[in-house]
Amino acid sequence: MEVATSSIAPIGEVGMSEEKIETTDSEKVYWSENIRLLSSLMVIWFVVSFGAGIMFREWLDQFSLGGYPLGFWFAQQGSIYIFIGLIYFYSWKIHKIEQKYHVDDDQSDKDDQA
Amino acid sequence: MSTQTLIYLFVGLSFAMYIGIAIWSRAASTKDFYIAGGGVNPVVNGMATAADWMSAASFISMAGIIAFSGYDASVYLMGWTGGYVMLALLLAPYLRKFGQFTVPDFIGTRYYSKAARVVAVICLIFISFTYIAGQMRGVGIVFSRFLDVPITMGVIIGMAIVFVYAVLGGMKGITYTQVAQYCVLIFAYMVPAFFISFLLTDNPIPQLGLGSTVNDGSGLYVLQKLDLVLQDMGFGAYTDGSKSMIDVFCITAALMIGTAGLPHVIVRFFTVPKASDARKSAGWALVFIALLYTTAPAVGAFARLNFIDSVQDQDYATAPAWFKNWEANDLIAWRDKNGDGKMQLGNGDPFKGAPEFDEVAGASGERVVKNDAADDNVNEVYVDRDIMVLANPEIANLPGWVIALVAAGGLAAALSTAAGLLLVISSSISHDLLKQTFRPRITEKGELLAARLAATAAIVVAGYLGIYPPGWVAQVVAFAFGLAAASLFPAIFMGIFSKRMNREGAIAGMVTGLTFTFLYIGWFKLWSPASNIAANWLFGISPEGIGVIGMVLNFAVAITVAKFTSAPPAEVGKLVDNIRVPRLS
C-alpha cells in the first residue's frame, strides 16, 4: 500500500481549513467517488418513490402491470423492490471502490470476528 | 382444540420462548447491554432490525389503514421502507465506523459539546416515548380481544414480559428475542395472507394475487372490482387518493427521513462487527421488512372486499360471529339509521366520534350507541381500522390455529418494538446523561445497574401511556417520525457529510426543528384539534407531514448559524475523516 493512513499524520496546530493535509489522496478520491455514487442512487430512490409513486402516479396509471395500475404499483409495491435493489447495489459497488483505493475493512475480518 | 385454547397455547409458547432466550443471553457488561457486544452477524441483525422496526402499527394497523384509504396509504408503504435506503447509504456505515454506543454519543462527540449531547437525549426520549405508547396499546388490544383480559391487564402482562428480557438481557437479550419475534410475526402475517389470497384469486402469493383477477367469474381484476364496488357505494376509487399531492409528498418524506433518524433503528447498526456489515445488514433488514410491507397492500384490499361482502345489506340478526365479537369489544358498532334491521355501509361517519355504548340492546339486539347522530349519509357501521388484520382470519373463515397465530404475531410485533425503544431510552439515560455528562466517575457495574433501573422506569411510563393512550395506535406512531426527521436526522447527516458544521449550528438546528414540529403537531392535534383542516395548514401540509418543513428549517438554521460561528476544532475534522473510511486504522 502506497499511502500512509490518516491516523499517523500529525495533527499539530493544523486547523480545519488545512485539514486536507491529513487526508491521504486515495481517501479523498474515494470519498468523491462515494459521493458521486450516492448522488446517483439517491436520484433513483427519489424518482421511483416521489416521482413514479406520487408526482407522476396519475399519468402512469393509464398503463397497467397485470391488474395493477402502474403508478399505484410503484406506490405500493415497485418502489419497495427497487429500494432493496438500491441497497444491495450500493453495498456491492462501494465495496469495489473501497478495494480499489485500499480503504475497505476486509483485513480486519479476522481480528474482529475472533 | 377450541380456538381459545389454541390462542392461549400459541401466546404462552411464544412468551416462554422469549423468556428462555432472555435467560440464555443475559448481558454481562455495558457493551453487551448497549450494543450486544458489537459482534452480531449482519443477517441476524437485519432480522432483529425488522422486528424492532415493525411495530404494532405495522402488524395490526397498517393493512387496516390501507383497506380504508387505498392509494392514500401508500405514504406508509413507501415512507416506512424508503428510509432504509437513506440509512444504508447515508448513515449506518459511518455511525458504525464511529463505533460508540448511542446516537447522542455521536452527536455529543462530533459536535464536541455536552449541550449537544443533552439536546440529542431530549429529542430521543421525546421520540421514543411517543412511539412506545402505541406499542403498549397494541399489546392491550390483542390481549383484550384474544385472551379475554381487560386492556389494562393486557398492558401489565406485556410490561412484565418486556421487563424480563429487556432488563436482564439488554441489547443482547433483545437482539435474539427479536429474531424469534420476527419469525413469529412474519409467519403469523403471511399464513392468513396466503389463505385469503388463494380464496379470492386462486393465487396464493398475495403480491401477485393483488394483481390478479377475482375468482368470482366476473373476470375483473381485484383492484378493478374494488374500485367499482366502492364507487357504487359512494366512496372514492380505491386506487385513487383523496389527499393533496403536496401532503402525500410531505408525509412520505417525513416518514422516510424520520425512519432514518429513529434512534432505536440506528442503534441496531452499532451491533454489527464493521461498517460494511452495517450496509449489508440494512439490506437484509429491508428484505425482511418488505416481505410484510408488500403483503400488507394485498391483505388490505382483500380484507376490504371480504368485509363489504359479509356485511353490506346483511341482517344484523344473522351477522357473522366475528362482527358481534368485535362489537362486544367496542371496536365495531352499528346504528340502524333506516330501521330496516340490515347493515348498510357508505361514505361518512355512522355517528359522531368513537362509539359510547348504552346498557340496553336495540331492536335487532345490537348494542345501542349513545353518540350524536350524523344523518347526512347512509353509513351505519363503525369499524375501528385496527381490527382488520386481527379480524381478517375470522372474516375469511380460516381455521382456529391461524387466528391463534395472528394473536401471537401481533404481540411479537408490539413487544419487539417496545423492547427496542426501552433500550434506547435507558441507554441514553445511563450512558449519555449519567456516564458522559453528570456522573463521569460511575463504575461499569454502576452504569449497568443504572441502565437496568432506567429501563424499568421507562417500562412503567410506557405502560401508563398504553393504558391512557394519547390517540389511536398508528397516529401516535406517526408523530415520532416528524420529530425524528426534524431534529436528529439533520444533525447526524451534517455531522458526516459536512466538516464545517459546528456545535452552535447543530444545536440551534435541532432546537429549531424540534420546537417548530412539536408546536405545529401539538397545535393541530392537542390544543386546537377543531382547526385541524387543510385550509388552516401551512402550505397544505398536515401535521403528519410537517416534519419535512421542520427538517428544512433545521438545515437552514444550522447552516446559517455555523457560517457566523467558528469552525470546529481540528480533532473533529480528523474524526470525520476517520468515519468516512471503512478501513480500521
Image (cartoon, helix red, strand yellow):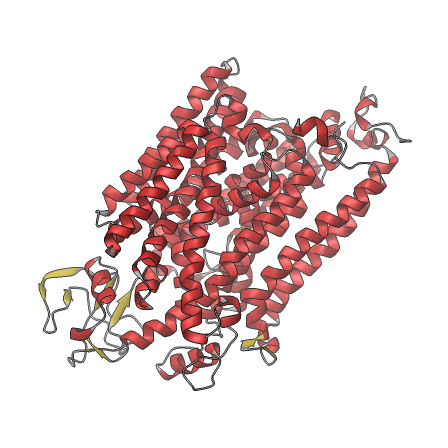
**Where does the image place residue B515, in percent across and percent down from the top left?**
48, 43
Examine the rendered structure and indicate whether residue B324 appears above or below residue A91.
below
| Depth order, front residue of B347/B171 | B171
**Where does the image place residue B541, in percent across and percent down from the top left?**
50, 60
Residue B132 placement: quadrant: top left
Examine the rendered structure and indicate whether residue B292 appears above or below residue B350.
above
Residue B106 placement: quadrant: top right
**Where does the image place residue B175, in percent across and percent down from the top left?**
50, 37
Give the residue displayed 14% in from the left and 65% down from the top.
B367
Residue A73 placement: quadrant: bottom right
| Depth order, front residue of B68/B124 | B68
Q: Residue furthest front?
A: B1
Give the residue displayed 24% in from the left and 53% down from the top.
B4
Q: Specify whether residue B254 is in view.
A: no
| Depth order, front residue of B491/B532 | B491
Drawn side of residue B24 relative to residue B373, left or right? right
Examine the rendered structure and indicate whether residue B323 appears above or below residue B79.
below
Quadrant (top left, top right, bottom left, bottom right) of the N terminus of chain B: bottom left
User: How many numbered discs sit on the rendered protein?
Assistant: 0
Give the residue displayed 22% in from the left and 58% down from the top.
B330
Drawn side of residue B539 relative to residue B534, left or right? right
**Where does the image place residue B420, in percent across and percent down from the top left?**
46, 38
Q: Residue furthest right?
A: A2
Q: Specify whether residue B377 is in view.
A: yes
Q: Residue furthest bottom?
A: B218
